[in-house]
Amino acid sequence: MITKVTKQSYTVPCSTEFRDVVVKLAESRSVNVADLARSILLVLPQDIIESFPDPGEPEAGDREKAILKSGSSKGRPWLRKPRLQVRLTPGYDISFVRRALNLAVILDNDQYSVNLQKAEVGAQTNFTEHMTMKTRRLFQGASKGMSGDKERLREIIAALSFTPLRDGLSNRIDALHVMGFFPSEQPDRDVVRSKFKLLARIHHPDSNYGDHQRMSQLNAAMDLLNL
């Protein structure tokens, strides 16, 4: 007998950039955003998902225009936080759903891959990550309980982040590298600023996983790009 599970609608606040990346990925796979989240939630263990960073809520100035659909102000425009709407089984934390969606994007960018190996009798399926030896060790370490999570997460962020330029930035190509764009890209002002806000939340020295050198080079990149 099949038991029907009632699904819950989740409103997931996130930056405009992250929302657009997730929606684009879902469209490219001809699925909806909830399908992306479910693909991660069903395949990967909870502690692995939790070891990856939460992209977080949008900055104060990151808002989208929406039209009120009910109430005395129906039809009026208002500014709200960018968000993703997904329907999943009840019980998930919003931060956890964001992490799952972030991991879907990371996997799609080939930053990590998942290898499913046939398990021996009584053994669990082995998930192995194949990027570099350094990130492979980090990924495997992340599955060993919750102790030391902050330090492992800090190392994972460092492994996935841009490598600071030893001699600093001197030209536009250097700036594009630091911001995570290809040398030939011509990102517009809004895209660059949105990317800067996202990276600044990660690398600002006041954050839990901040890095003074990366933050300094992010600021230098914005100066070089004249934005």
Image (tube, rainbow, N blue to C red):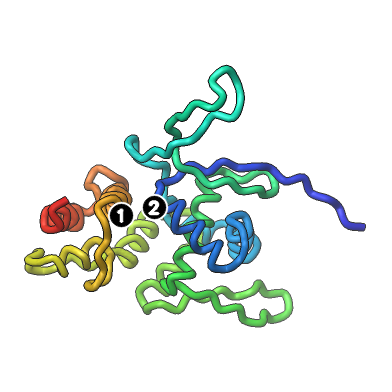
Q: Is residue 125 left or right of residue 49?
A: right
Task: Indicate the secondary structure of the residue bearing disc 1.
Answer: helix
Q: Which mark is residue 191?
A: 1
Q: Which mark is residue 17?
A: 2
Q: Residue furthest front?
A: 75
Quarter of the image with the N terminus is bottom right
- Decide: is 104 above or below 66: below
- Decide: is 80 above or below 14: above
Q: Is residue 32 left or right of residue 225?
A: right
Task: Indicate the secondary structure of the residue bearing disc 2.
Answer: helix
Q: Identify the residue at horizontal 48%, vertical 70% (top origin).
A: 108
Q: Is residue 190 visible?
A: yes
Circle 2: residue type: Glu
Q: Identify the residue at horizontal 83%, vertical 50% (top origin).
A: 4
Residue 21 % position (x, y):
44, 58
Q: Identify the residue at horizontal 30%, vertical 54% (top origin).
A: 191
Q: Is residue 196 left or right of residue 141?
A: left
Residue 2 or 171: which is nearer the viewer? 171
Q: Are marks 2 and 1 in contact (CB under 8 Å)?
A: yes
Q: Which mark is residue 34?
A: none
- Decide: is 87 above or below 180: above
Q: Identify the residue at horizontal 22%, vertical 47% (top origin).
A: 205
Residue 35 or 214: which is nearer the viewer? 35
Residue 73 or 114: which is nearer the viewer? 73
Q: Is residue 209 visible?
A: no
Residue 144 % position (x, y):
51, 63
Q: Categorize mark 2 by other alpha carbons within 10 Å: few (<14), some (14-19), many (20+).
A: some
